[in-house]
């Protein structure tokens, strides 16, 4: 399986910003419309990380015009131009599905001070 | 390109030019060595190219097998296959020639032939996707069975041939048709096919030109 590992490593990005579940992040996504390309920003809370080599993904949740929107991004997707961590949320579990049932203030996460003190 | 043998290394995903994900099977192909040309007008009565794959020490093969290679002065190989060609195509080959990834082209389609994973003697639900029976509503004992077959008395009082019944599943030859060659890594003899290929990892796979390749 050694060769398979090498292949997967080759397909993986090395410049992925580190972030954790509970962080609020901005995902800069390249959108191709016809022959034009622009960058769209998707900002929300990371509610899940799925770790599996090249196939790793993360789910970002945001509430847009009162509607909850979740998007699953491949961690190593070349379509993601940039990833910014806005703030770290203090969470005690790896899957934040409980946020789905919450709206308004109860859907907020307590923030951790900058500097990865919890890491 | 007509045919080449290889080993399935496993499946992964690779990124397309627009950032799309594609399922990929990685096959390590060749190098294969042409061991014999069979000719229509010769002893064999048909045109074919015979080739070997995976060099092994002589002691791994039986004496008749070794003889095939001794006769043409080549190193012994574990697997021997042949594929039919037309008379013109036969002229492109010669004994001792190696077949490598160079004979494949990105963008072409191939059929992959392998031996599927053996599943043993399986029931009808796994083997033929029968629905089985309700777990309640008075059903007893027979939850995964095949149901009735054959009927009685006049019509027809026998089981129609070819009826789907429990039995051996897998461990038989299977072909995945029309797989796109997405990428080739000549340095490591690797081919990336879009889709699944029959067989387990490290199983031997035969790649041949696709029978139903779409017109481009």
Image: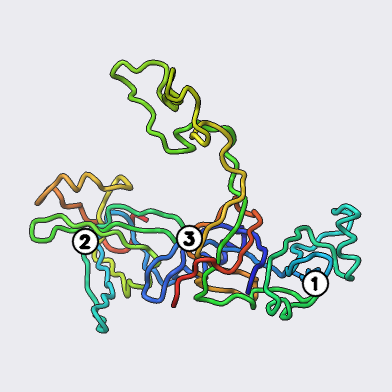
Residue shown at 26%/48% (left/top)? Answer: A96
Cα–Cα span, label 1 and label 3 = 40 Å
Badge 2 marks a residue whose secondary structure is: strand
Q: Chain of mark 3?
A: B
> Residue shown at 24%/81% (left/top)?
A34
Using the rendered view, name the quadrant where residue A23 is placed: bottom left
Q: Please identify the residue farthest to the bottom as the structure is shown.
A: A35
- Crowd around label 1: few <14 · some 14–19 · many ≥20 (10 Å): few
Q: Residue B56: x and y, percent?
A: 82, 60
Residue furthest front in the image: B154
Q: Which numbered circle lies on residue B62?
A: none
2 and 3 marks in contact (CB < 8 Å) = no
Q: Chain of mark 1?
A: B
SS class of the residue under badge 1? loop
Q: Alpha-carbon distance for marks 2 and 3? A: 34 Å
Q: Nearer the viewer, residue B5 or A87?
A: B5
- Position of the N terminus of chain B by quadrant: bottom right
Q: Nearer the viewer, mark 2 or mark 3?
A: 3
Looking at the rendered image, the disc whose residue lies closer to the viewer, 2 or 1, is 1
Compared with residue B120, is residue A19 higher up or lower down, i.e. above or below? below
Q: Which residue is mark 3?
A: B195
State the residue position of label 2: A44
Foreground: disc 1 or disc 3: 1
B165 to the left or right of A108: right
Estimate the x, y position of residue B172 in percent, counting from the top left. 61, 46
At which x and y percent is residue A27? Answer: 27, 68
Asked if badge 2 and badge 1 are on a common chain, one would say no
């Amino acid at each position: 399986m050694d060769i398979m590992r090498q292949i997967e490593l080759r397909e993986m990005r090395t410049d992925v910003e580190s972030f954790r579940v509970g962080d609020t992040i901005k995902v800069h996504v390249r959108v191709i419309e016809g022959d034009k390309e622009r960058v769209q920003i998707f900002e929300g809370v990371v509610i899940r990380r799925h770790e599996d080599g090249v196939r790793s993904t993360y789910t970002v949740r945001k509430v847009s015009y009162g509607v909850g929107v979740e998007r699953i991004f491949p961690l190593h997707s070349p379509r993601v131009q940039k990833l910014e961590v806005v703030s770290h949320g203090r969470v005690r579990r790896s899957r934040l599905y409980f946020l789905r049932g919450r709206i308004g203030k109860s859907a907020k996460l307590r923030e951790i001070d900058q500097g990865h003190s919890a890491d | 390109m007509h045919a080449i043998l290889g080993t399935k290394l496993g499946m992964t995903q690779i990124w397309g030019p627009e950032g799309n994900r594609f399922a990929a099977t990685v096959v390590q192909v060749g190098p294969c060595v042409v061991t014999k040309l069979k000719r229509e007008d010769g002893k064999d009565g048909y045109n074919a190219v015979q080739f070997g794959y995976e060099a092994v020490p002589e002691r791994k093969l039986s004496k008749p097998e070794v003889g095939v290679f001794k006769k043409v002065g080549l190193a012994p190989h574990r697997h021997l296959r042949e594929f039919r060609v037309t008379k013109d195509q036969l002229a492109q080959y010669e004994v001792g020639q190696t077949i490598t990834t160079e004979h494949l082209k990105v963008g072409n389609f191939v059929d992959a032939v392998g031996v599927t994973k053996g599943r043993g003697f399986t029931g009808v639900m796994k083997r033929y996707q029968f629905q089985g029976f309700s777990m309640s509503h008075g059903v007893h004992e027979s939850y995964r069975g095949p149901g009735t077959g054959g009927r009685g008395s006049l019509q027809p009082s026998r089981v129609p041939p070819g009826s789907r019944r429990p039995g051996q599943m897998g461990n038989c030859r299977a072909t995945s048709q029309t797989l796109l060659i997405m990428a080739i890594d000549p340095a490591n003899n690797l081919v990336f096919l879009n889709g699944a290929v029959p067989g387990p990892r490290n199983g031997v796979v035969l790649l041949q030109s696709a029978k139903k390749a779409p017109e481009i």
